[in-house]
Amino acid sequence: MRRTALVTGAAKRVGRAIALELAANGYDLAIHYRSSATEAEDVARACRESGAHAFLIRGDLSDVDACREVVRAVREQWDTVDLLVNNASLFEPVPFEQVTVEQIDTMHALHVRAPFLLSQGLLEPLRKAEDGLVIHLCDIGAERPVPGYAHYSVSKAALVMLVRAMAVELGPDLRCVGVSPGQVAWPPSYSEEKRARLAKKIPLERAGEPEDIARLVRFVALEANYLNGCILPVDGGLSARYP
């Protein structure tokens, strides 16, 4: 019998890689997206080619009602949810003095409130699973911020605490683990020069790939069932470097 997983922000980049990896390893998929309908359809098609049942859910997770609708759509399909991957994210640079209240609220809504509400809303079907698991996609910036991303880093730091709080309060019924990417998918706006310069700061002197995250998610879900409450960096050693 195939397992079931909801992956948020699954149309592109890291979310896409996670969905495809899970589909190839025995999971049926609920593929959430916000606006990238064509890309989401492509992901669903690729998952089905791997033998998975895959369906799409659209919604802006910065909106409370949209979070509730995602929960409703998943529970309508499945009585049991084996895995929830909270991947949907927004990454935008804004100088500290220019960050608006609206931008702060959006970051927290997407990176903290939405993962909380989805986890809470799917708690019953997650508890029904043999090894229910929630994975939050955190960021090494939660502990090592860079200039221009204060509002982003603060929200991801709160998500790190959500991992730990859920692990402590919801075990043994389910596990919660954080996966904390470094540079695994370049923002499209980064020039080749900037990419090369930033890669030099990584001890491995190269960026990772979305598939590096996807393989770790699969490992945590299928092979590492004693992991709980931890934050796993996937960054080529960048977070170990000073300065």
Image (cartoon, rainbow, N blue to C red):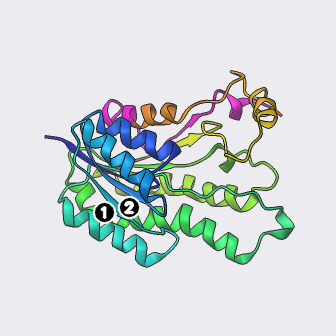
Q: Is residue 224 left or right of residue 128?
A: right
**Residue 206 found in image quarter:** top right
Q: Residue at x 80, y 56 (%)?
A: 148
Q: Position of residue 23 (x, y in %)?
A: 30, 39
**Which quadrant of the rendered structure holds the C terminus?**
top right
Q: Position of residue 44 (x, y in %)?
A: 33, 48
Crowdedness near tag 2: few (<14), some (14–19) or many (≥20) residues, C-alpha within 10 Å = many
- In the rendered view, would you say 241 is above or below 19? above
Q: Are marks 1 and 2 in contact (CB under 8 Å)?
A: yes
Q: Which residues are magenta?
A: 218-241
| Residue 16 visible within the image | yes
Check disc 1 and report its element: helix, strand or loop: loop
**Which quadrant of the rendered structure holds the N terminus?**
top left
The amino acid type found where label 1 is placed reads: Leu
Q: Residue at x 21, y 38 (%)?
A: 51
Q: Which residue is mark 2?
A: 119
| Residue toward you, 49 or 185 | 49
Check disc 2 and report its element: helix, strand or loop: helix
Residue 31 in the magenta stretch? The answer is no
- In the rendered view, would you say 194 is above or below 171? above
Residue found farthest to the top: 204
| Residue 229 visible within the image | no
Q: Position of residue 183 (x, y in %)?
A: 65, 37
Distance in Å between CA atoms under marks 1 and 2: 5 Å
**Residue 149 found in image quarter:** bottom right
The amino acid type found where label 2 is placed reads: Ser
Q: Which residue is mark 1?
A: 122
Q: Residue at x 48, y 32 (%)?
A: 211
Residue found farthest to the front: 38
Q: Position of residue 42 (x, y in %)?
A: 38, 47
